[in-house]
Image (cartoon, grey):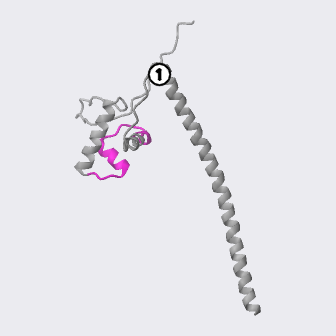
Amino acid sequence: MRELLDKIEARQQLVQDTVERLREQITLLSEQLAAAERTLQRLQVTRETVLELAVEDGGSLPEPLPPGYREVLAAFEQAGRGLRARDVCQALGIGLEPRHTEGTRAKLKRLVNRGILTEPEPEPEPEPEPGLYILPQPTSAAPDTSSN
């Protein structure tokens, strides 16, 4: 009988340890969830404010990007340089077969038409390499030197 009670006590301790570890994980996850929810809320408010200001300044609301285009833009932001359709396919982990690169190239052309990407003219030397796409660089205002 003593042996059975020892087994029960050992199992009870094991389960108690598991309960405590799970409670700690729940506490940690709850804190992480609360932080993520606060960040999400701030981003939503920021986005709404930017859209309101754009409309107030006479702009129009940007059309939302269709599915798959945000991932393409994220690849450009992560690379920090110009990319070709094949580079984007590699960055997104999709195949490099012609059907994938041509589909990606079509997306890149659509982003150029919307003014989200640019396709600079190829350099004439040594050999032109068309098909490079880049994120447009923000234009900085010229410094005001008239107040001297």
Quadrant, the C terminus: top right
* Residue in the image at 70% along x and 71% along y: 17
The quarter holding residue 2 reads: bottom right
61 or 29, which is in the foreground?
61
36 to the left or right of 110: right
What span is in magenta? 76-96
At which x and y percent is residue 102?
A: 24, 44
122 or 62, which is in the foreground?
62
5 or 76, which is in the foreground?
5
The quarter holding residue 37 reads: top right
121 to the left or right of 27: left
At which x and y percent is residue 88?
A: 34, 44
* Residue in the image at 56% along x and 33% along y: 46
- SS label for mark 1: loop
Quadrant, the N terminus: bottom right
135 lies above or below 38 = above
64 to the left or right of 104: right
* Residue in the image at 63% along x and 46% along y: 35
The question of residue 10 being in magenta is answered with: no
Q: Can you identify the residue that label 1 sits on? A: 140
The quarter holding residue 45 reads: top right
Q: Residues within 10 Å of mark 1 (few under 14, many from 20)?
A: few
At which x and y percent is residue 62?
A: 42, 30
Q: Amino acid at mark 1?
A: Ser
- Residue lying farthest right? 2
